[in-house]
Amino acid sequence: MRLSKTSEYAIRVLSFMATSPERQVFSVMFIHQELEIPYKYLTKIMRMLSQAGMVAATQGREGGFSFAKPLASIKLTEIVAAVEKNADESPCILGFRYCNDQKPCALHPFWLKPKSAIDEMMLGVTLADLDAKSIRKV
Amino acid sequence: MRLSKTSEYAIRVLSFMATSPERQVFSVMFIHQELEIPYKYLTKIMRMLSQAGMVAATQGREGGFSFAKPLASIKLTEIVAAVEKNADESPCILGFRYCNDQKPCALHPFWLKPKSAIDEMMLGVTLADLDAKSIRKV
DNA sequence: TTTAAATGCTACCTATCGGTGGTATTTTAA
DNA sequence: TTAAAATACCACCGATAGGTAGCATTTAAA
Ligand code: SF4
Ligand code: SF4
């Protein structure tokens, strides 16, 4: 009942960047040293976030990644979607195929509250909502 | 943001059994045909649930699995714990190691509500709470 | 008594996820 | 001008989750 490690990494990186007002550009090496995420794997994740248009890469010496759009426009759900294929393949814990509120499985009534709370967070929270005073490293 | 497929299977099987008052003993072959869960994999899962003491196996012809304790005593969280190793290894979406309410990460305030809703369901709902009139097959 | 239908167990296979290696390309500081 | 520091890309590797094969054992119906 948790995110993939890859999504964890992506969210950690972006929330770290979002709460670092003293800096605009972040190299993979810097993030790697700060957050202890494997360097090579991190480059792969950053490239995915870049291809998804969340961050922009500037190549060459003194290059790195910076945000490509306003923090308030980057929702958690998009971050997950950017790095995780099949992120939405089955939206429910039990993964029934032909269910709905009229034909629910036995767990449906109990799932509604967690489901809506999760959706509220994933769809409602953006990087602009994060507090810079929080701890930012593992 | 979902359960493992194995946990899905386990919960589906037990909720199917729990909402089948007309029958006490379920062979793997029967469950396999009803729920379309791979036969051999299902035997493995049933053996795990049996070893966890949730169901009891009767061997031999006309044998199968039946509940080994009251439905009201089987919580969702135990079902998951029975089939998933490391089920609780990191209880949080972001998996920070040294965080708490005083030293939270930037997402902590938004995670509290989903977290408590999930816990409420996993710890609060038992097989006795399920409605036999629900759909029970995928 | 035989045989079919069931579980018990172990070893293996396969796909996916997390992670690594190596090399090419771009850019700027020295 | 050169070398260092950065991203881009591709192929592979290792671990784990999901799934299969095969055979031994148990039991009751026929
Ligand atoms: S009925 Fe509800 S809880 Fe059950 S599988 Fe469908 S969406 Fe999920
Ligand atoms: S601070 Fe809260 S949300 Fe963040 S990793 Fe810890 S428990 Fe999870």
Image (cartoon, coloured by chain):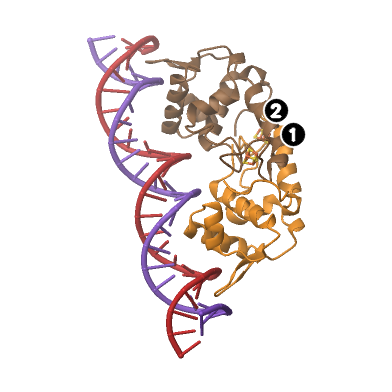
Chain colours: A orange, B brown, C purple, D red
Q: Is residue C4 left or right of residue A47?
A: left
> Which image quarter holds the N terminus of chain B?
top right
Q: Looking at the image, which residue is at 53% across and 37% down?
A: B5
The chain letter under disc 1 is A
Q: Position of residue A66 (x, y in %)?
A: 65, 65
Question: Is D14 in front, or is B112?
Answer: B112
SS at mark 1? loop
Q: Looking at the image, which residue is at 57% across and 73% down?
A: A59
Q: Is residue A11 visible in the rendered structure shown here?
A: yes
Q: Position of residue A131 (x, y in %)?
A: 73, 48
Q: Is residue B51 left or right of residue B126?
A: left
Where is residue A101, by image quadrant?
top right
* Mark 1 Cβ and ligand 1 under 8 Å apart: yes
Q: Amino acid at mark 2?
A: Phe
The chain letter under disc 2 is A
Q: Looking at the image, which residue is at 64% across and 54% down?
A: A16
Question: Is D30 in front, or is A65?
Answer: A65
In this view, B38 is above or below A36: above
Name the residue tied to disc 2: A110
Question: Is B104 in front, or is B27?
Answer: B104
Q: Position of residue B104 (x, y in %)?
A: 66, 40
SS at mark 2? helix
Name the residue tied to disc 1: A101
Looking at the image, is mark 2 or mark 1 earlier in the sequence?
Answer: 1
Mark 2 to mark 1 CA distance (whole Å): 12 Å
Q: Amino acid at mark 1?
A: Asp
Circle 2 packing at 10 Å, graded few (<14), some (14-19), many (20+), is some
Q: Is residue A104 visible in the rendered structure shown here?
A: no
Q: Position of residue B37 (x, y in %)?
A: 50, 33
* Mark 2 Cβ and ligand 1 under 8 Å apart: yes
| Circles 2 and 1 on the same subunit | yes
